[in-house]
Image (cartoon, grey):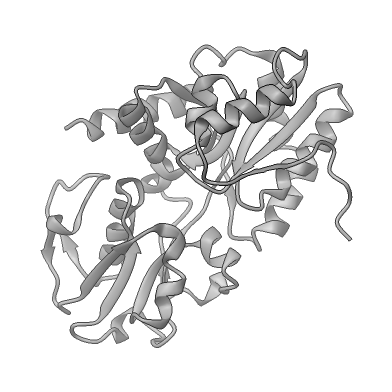
Amino acid sequence: MTPPLPRRRVLLAAATATALSLLVGGCGLTGDDHRIRIGVSGDSTEWDVLAKEAKKEGLDVEVVVFDDYSLPNKALSAGDLDLNAFQHLVFLAQSNEENGTDIVPLAPTVVVPLGLYSGKHRKAADLPDGGRVALPNDPANQGRGLRVLEQAGLIRLKPGTGLFATPDDIAANPKHLELTPMNAQQTPRALKDTDASVINDGVASLAGIDAKSALFKDDPKSPATVPYLNVIAARAGGEDNADYRRIVELYASAPVQAEVRRSSNGTAHHVELSGAKLRAELDRVAKELKR
């Protein structure tokens, strides 16, 4: 049986940011000392563990769960959340650019490998000539997906291609693979209709796919994956908030990390990197986005 949560988890469907404001305002969440509202996505049970640990120290953590990636940054920017933890640096840079927001990373949480999966073939080299491959269609993840295909030896990208590569940046495709971009959450379903699919390990795990079955994955310890570190984020100016700093420390604690490993089936890798270095990397990514 799942134990009762320290604060109720609020599941927010893909509605509107206005609905979120009404929900949070209606629950009287604004203005409470030491109450911290954290927006997450998916079944992020490590945040429930963190909320229990925080409660012991007098911090009241409200875990707000979203099923639409477009909402947590809007809610944070609007002041309906204090923190969020659902995105990597490339996604954050793109979101800030598109929405005119100033959200900054405080600390990394985990990096989750991106893998090439297949229900028909056992090795990347086995993909047939003209084979169909699904990959994420959002700019924040499509470039990474193309890098996975390149690292797996299936395609070659043009020299100098950056983080935001598209299929137009492919210089060589010797197997004449047919690439099918789609919503990242749909990539597991594509396995039945394609020869392979590029899937985030976390998404694969939620879909019941064994992460160990991937034909190829990028290396979570490689410097090339730093832009894909998931982060705890706040509005600019929150970097020195003492309660936020304690949340960062609690995330790295043994109880929370044990739940990260359990809930991710070992696919999520916790990374230590200073907030200053994360913000410098975010600035670098943002500059590349504007090229």
- Vertical order, 173 against 251 (above or below): below
The percent coordinates of residue 163 (x first, y second) are 27, 45
User: Viewer-proximal residue, 201 or 249?
Assistant: 201
- The residue that appears at 12% across and 55% down in the rendered structure is 158
User: Viewer-proximal residue, 7 or 105?
Assistant: 7
- The residue that appears at 42% across and 20% down in the rendered structure is 102
User: Viewer-proximal residue, 200 or 40?
Assistant: 40
- Vertical order, 80 against 123 (above or below): above
Which part of the image, by quadrant, shows the N terminus? Answer: bottom right
The percent coordinates of residue 270 (x first, y second) are 60, 45
- The residue that appears at 74% across and 51% down in the rendered structure is 259
User: Viewer-proximal residue, 68 or 109?
Assistant: 68
| Left or right, residue 207 beside residue 136 | right
Number of marks drawn:
0
Q: Quadrant of residue 76?
A: top right
Q: Quadrant of residue 6?
A: top right
| Left or right, residue 129 beside residue 283 | left
- The residue that appears at 60% across and 72% down in the rendered structure is 208
Is residue 213 visible in this depiction of the protein? yes
The percent coordinates of residue 262 (x first, y second) are 72, 58
Which part of the image, by quadrant, shows the C terminus? Answer: top left
Is residue 274 visible in this depiction of the protein? no
The percent coordinates of residue 167 (x first, y second) are 18, 59
